[in-house]
Every structure is written in C-alpha cells, then in structure tokens.
Amino acid sequence: MSRLLAAALTVVLASALAVGAALGVVALLDATPEQPNTPLITYEHAGQGS
C-alpha cells in the first residue's frame, strides 16, 4: 500500500510541476513587449516604364 501511495504522490507532484512550468512559460511570453512590425528592406518603386 505504501508503494501505491508513493506512486500516486509522485504523479500528483509531477503534474503540479508540469502545470506550474507551463503557466510560468505563458507568463514569460506575455511579459515580453510586442516588437514593431517594420520591414528590414524597403524597395523604392521605379516609374512605370521599367
């Protein structure tokens, strides 16, 4: 019976750790500021007769 209790406790602790890690990753991703969407390369449009 003690092995079953130890296994169940291990499963509960592992799942709590996984949920905590997932919430931590989501919190870190939400904490990063949005980057501006500016193009690195811009092309000048030439006249119609190219």
Image: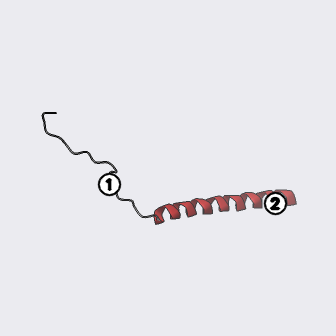
Which element carries disc 1, helix, strand or loop? loop
What residue is rendered at 39% in x and 59% in y? 35
**Horizontal arrangement in the rendering, residue 43 relative to residue 22 (left or right):** left
Q: Is residue 22 left or right of residue 47?
A: right
Q: Against 20, is 43 above or below?
A: above
Helix, strand or loop at mark 2: helix
Label located before the other in sequence (2 or 1): 2
Q: CA distance from mark 2 to mark 1?
A: 55 Å
Left/right of residue 9 with respect to residue 28 in the rendered view: right
- Which residue is pictured at 52% across the width and 60% down the height? 26
Task: Name the quarter where the C terminus is drawn.
Answer: top left
In this figure, which residue is indicated by the disc labeled 1? 38
Where is residue 48 shown, x and y percent of the image?
Answer: 13, 36
* Circle 2: residue type: Ala
Which x, y percent locates residue 46?
17, 40
Query: Between 13 and 47, which is closer to the camera in this rendering?
Result: 47
Nearer the observer, 39 or 34: 39
